[in-house]
Image: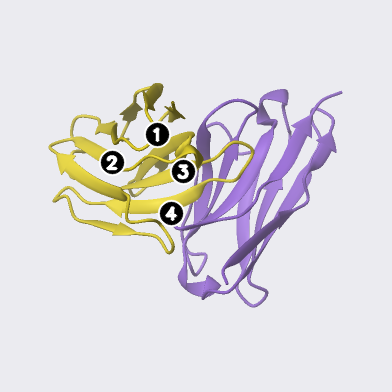
Chain colours: A purple, B yellow
Amino acid sequence: EVQLVESGGGLVQPGGSLRLSCAASGFTFSSYWMHWVRQAPGKGLVWVSRIKSDGSSITYADSVKGRFTISRDNAKNTLYLQMNSLRADDTAVYYCVATFEYWGQGTLVTVSS
Amino acid sequence: QPVLTQSSSASASLGSSVKLTCTLSSGHSGNIIAWHQQQPGKAPRYLMNLESSGRYSKGSGVPDRFSGSTSGAVRYLTISNLQFEDEADYYCDTWDSNTRVFGGGTKLTVL
């Protein structure tokens, strides 16, 4: 059974940092492009970042460029998102997604003072 | 980069059919798209990917009631024999070498 389990979300003050993790199982993680997608409360899905299967290609949405860093550890079947300089408009549920096919259950990040 | 346009809402009666649309912006009519379903309070679920030829490939466990089709830059998701559990938000998405984009989503109400 394919599983993507995100963790690391929580409440953080504006300007703070968080590191999200996504543990993958049930498929060949090292063969898949991985993405982070977020959803603000009551809003639609927004793509955040992606990383190629071997980590050799990375892209970001303009809204997070320079603040967020995506990475992966294929030996641990884990995807990461380091989020710095967080703002209120980063408040959202963050999903990890394998290509377009497999979704995690999401982790909530709330940026508030 | 591509832009995807979806109607904000749709409704149809239990047991009937509905056809949701996702329109690709100019210059991107050849893109493959994916359809996803998000039931209230749940994570999105992948339904299918859909090519410009109209060929589609569904995800594991997606009922036969769900199908896809194409006409030019428009990608369709058809749901037949609507059930109450089909009431959900439906998103399309596509990608290019630099980015991935989602449509704004269509909220489907089953009457």
Q: CA distance from mark 3 to mark 2?
A: 12 Å
Q: Which residue is mark 4?
A: A100
Give the labeled residue for mark 1. B14
Tell me if label 3 and label 1 are in contact, CB under 8 Å.
Answer: no
Amino acid bearing label 1:
Leu
Residue drawn 57% across and 72% down? A1
Give the CA distance from mark 1 to mark 2. 14 Å
The residue wearing badge 2 is B78
Percent of width and height locating residue A23: 68, 65
Quick check: B64 left or right of B39? left
* Local SS, label 2: strand
In primary-sequence order, the first of circles 3 and 1 is 1
Kindly identify which residue carries mark 3. B37
Mark nearest the camera among 2 and 4 is 2
Q: Residue at x 68, y 74 (%)?
A: A76
Which residue is at a point 37% across and 45% down the rendered structure image?
Answer: B35
